[in-house]
Image (cartoon, grey):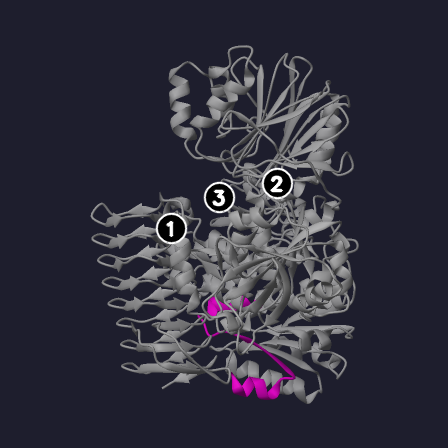
Amino acid sequence: MCGIVGYIGSRNAARVIVDGLQKLEYRGYDSFGVATNNPRIEVFKRKGKISEMGSDAWSLHGTIGIGHTRWATHGEPSDRNAHPHLDCRGRIAVVHNGIIENYAALTRELRERGHEFRSETDTEVVAHLVEEFYDGSDLRTAVEKTVARLEGSFALLVTVEGLEEVIAVRDSSPLVLGIGDREVFAASDVTPLLGYTERVVYLEDGDLATLDREGWRVYSHGHPVRRRVEHVDWDVETVKKGGFPHFMLKEIYEEPRVFHDTLHGFAASSLPERYRHPPEITVVACGSSYHAGLVFKYLCESTCRIPVRAELGSEFKYFTPPLKGIVTVITQSGETADTLAALKKARAYNCPTLAITNVLGSTVTRIADHTLYMRAGPEISVAATKSFVAQLAVLMRLIDLMRGNDRLLTALEQANTVIGEVLLLDIDRAVEICRPAEHLFYVGRGLFYPIALEGALKMKEISYIHAEGYAAGELKHGPFALLSDQTPVVALCPPGDTYSIMLSNIKEMKARKAPIIGIGASGDRELTDIVDVFLPIPESPELVQLVATSVVLQQLAYRTAVALECDVDQPRNLAKSVTVE
Amino acid sequence: MQAVILAAGEGTRLRPLTRSRPKALVPVANTPILKYVIDALLKNGIREIVVVVGYRKEHVIRYLTEQDLPVRVVVQEKQLGTGHALMCAEPFIRDRFLLLAGDNYIDAASIARIRAERNAVLVTDHPNPSNFGVVVTKDGLIREIKEKPDSPSGLIVSTGIYALDRSFLRYTAEHQEVPDALQAMIRDGTRVVPVRASEWLDAVNPWDLLEMNARLLPQIEARRAGTISRSAKLYGLIRVGKGTEIGPNTFIRGPVIIGEDCRICPNCVIMPNTSIGSRVTIDPLSYVARSLIMDDTAIGSHSRIIDAVVGEACRLQDHTATWTTGAVLERDGGYQKAAFGAVLGDRVCSAPFTVLKNCIVGNNAAISAGNTTVTGVIPDEAVVV
């Protein structure tokens, strides 16, 4: 998903476009660019977030322009691959949202005709095709001919040097026009228009619109058609969340798809040979990513028999990197300062490095030797939800890739449906127990210990309840003294090796009168009988239960925070990615 | 022109298929019913759409967001009737609007007929009028709408699609249900005209989805993505999603739609009027016809699935067969007779050699003994041994 904005009128186009792109940042934020038509084409494009670097583009002059904020699919984010793209002579500028499926064939054809390509994107073919068809006067026909050659889904904006006109095309990707007073806007959705105009025109698939200062005209299959001007009074936040009250909930509900897509997003060749049989592995990460790393430690040690160290990014500087073996870093944003510092240190010690991140082309991907991507899409909420399950998917798949088989992939076959299933779970009674609490304990054993830590972190960061995760066996070495009827405990008690000892731990906690929220396999009568609230996870392989349990804990934190009226998406004192050490 | 789509109700008569989604989100030809309604509006250039959600609202919202559809979502916290649902959208209604149900199929031509009217009800003929609101007309105007009458006075029924204006909200403020409010408005002397629909479909019972599926499948666009074996034989209107594999010697006759990332193993036969969702696996030598199979389901080898609605993530082991008879079913305290093979909820598991004979199996039910013939209605979470 990307976002595009176009403008023609009397304001400074670059400012209008940068302002609009910032509102579209939820659609993608790895790079951005603006082109103005003044009447020469001036371009500014950068890899990075528009919210941080957008004002640099204000230096562009002109009152006609187009812009783009990108979430990379073809070609990594870089200054070069950022839109707008130009033709060979730099006279035609194009921005594009969507995918051009036949771009490889078109690129070949255009190269043979002497066109020079500067980027790795699918979009650049559009600029060259328009150049091919443009006779210097009739831009609309040239764009029509171009569109006829394209397969896939797209929304396009095109502008040409010396021509006071912007052409907008929509086919299967959203595009709306905003109608002002002697000015016209175009954008991927209405958010960039709000604040400038309330009058919009929704283009339909196959529509081509010509925009100039006098107004706008829409054509379909070469013939003029009428499109109604409509009135919108939506607010920006509502549009972005698409109806969900918070981004966090939106992202939680994306998890079944994200887990499935990430898990199936790797070919057997995604992992180079030298990472397959390391003598040892060091995982370095911060926050939720660190907890994902801990899950990997338990899993890898038991399945691959390779020793794994999991370290916090900020503490790694006090340790020596492994003399042999690989260093793996996990960071959603790819910009976490502590993790980057650890990565640089590992590089200095000549360790082979592997990065796991969500953002194509982020800093971490440039420093690490090799990168594996999660396919979570942009995550807006500060509390990590879908990126955590995506990290689990990558790490579980990594074990398959190391072993050269598909065992975990097969075991996880049904994971997306089980995640979907736990989203239906009624957790009202569990929320009622957590809501008034001042302190909460999360306990688990083995693989579920990191999940308990992550559950506690989620609760802390968004509901501001003091929550601590413990290995269930450690409780007796101190924290047990804190237990009372005022300290509810969330106990993770899945079937398996840890079940019976976990059950006796729960009984001990119950004896201290702590209210217990038990999470275990559905149909577990024994557990149901001893806990105050039982949250069942459908019967499934252990790793599926692990992922599903973490989703339940995210929901518990979310619902508790909402019940306490906390600002879920922007918790106090916290930032999405911590870019200072 | 604005439009308000009501998609808050569960659609209890469609159980067990409505456990994880409201009726509006039940897929027919791999597209939720709600999407057909939105498309019909968009084709008429009606862009200001308010969707009222309630039951399993997150799933509806997630679907709408994923599709990037230009709609505004309003939440009805408790399902207190259609009139109340409309009142939830009240702050956004300016003047004239269309009111539609999100769980009935409607085509664009019908919308075109009613959109110009001021106060109108879209009506259609139905062979079983007593399931709907029966419209009584006089002198070309609607006199009365009788909800689900025992002895209907005619075959003309209301489709639940209305052209109204803001003044109607006075009546829904007092009446919980839209038909009651409309009745009150007619009594006050407002002229309400009937407009005939061109195509409108409602699935009252889960097995009605099979007919709806057969009616809507011819609308799909042919496409062959995925990896299709050279020796597979595909005839007719067929749409195959990306990532799907179709094995050697498999025979498919359209209209058939198959979603993304499915695995149709060698030597299967898929006959017309079948919809198969995404990530579905069908093992070798199975035969599927006139069926609606939802996402993530796996069907074992040598199975024979005919006239069946199969929910999400079912696991049917080898040699599972459906058997179409027209037996009488006891359901929700009433008796119904319908000819269909089977209706399975979500996550149903069946052991090898299970025969599903004209039965409805609830969500998460397990048929754990092999060689069993299942008939009648099996409740949710049941274990058949």
Q: Is residue B75 above or below residue A531?
A: above
Q: Secondary structure at mark 1?
A: helix
Pinpoint residue B302: horizontal percent, then vertical percent: 24, 67
* Chain identifier of the residue bearing label 1 in the image: B
Residue at the spot 62% in from the left edge and 59% down from the top edge: B139
Task: Work out whether residue A393 can be spotted.
Answer: yes
Residue at far top of view: A136
Give the quadrant of residue A493. bottom right
Q: Which residues make up the magenta segment?
A: A524-549
- Give the image quarter of residue A107: top left
Amino acid identity at mark 1: Pro
Label 3: chain?
A
State how far apart marks 3 and 2 are (Cα): 30 Å
- The residue closer to the viewer here, A390 or A13, is A13
Q: Is A180 left, or right, of A504 in this rendering?
A: right
Tag 2: amino acid: Gly
Q: Is residue B26 above or below residue A79?
A: below
The answer for how far apart the CA atoms under marks 2 and 1 are is: 37 Å
Residue assigned mark 1: B218
**Quadrant of residue A58 within the rendered picture:** top right
**For this rendering, which residue is in front, A309 or B358?**
B358
Q: Chain of mark 2?
A: A
Q: Amino acid at mark 3?
A: Pro
User: Label 3 crowding class (10 Å Cα cut-off): few <14, some 14-19, many 20+?
Assistant: some
Please give the residue where the numbered disc 3 appears in the rendered image.
A352
Is B8 or A515 nearer to us in this picture? B8
Residue matched to label 2: A28
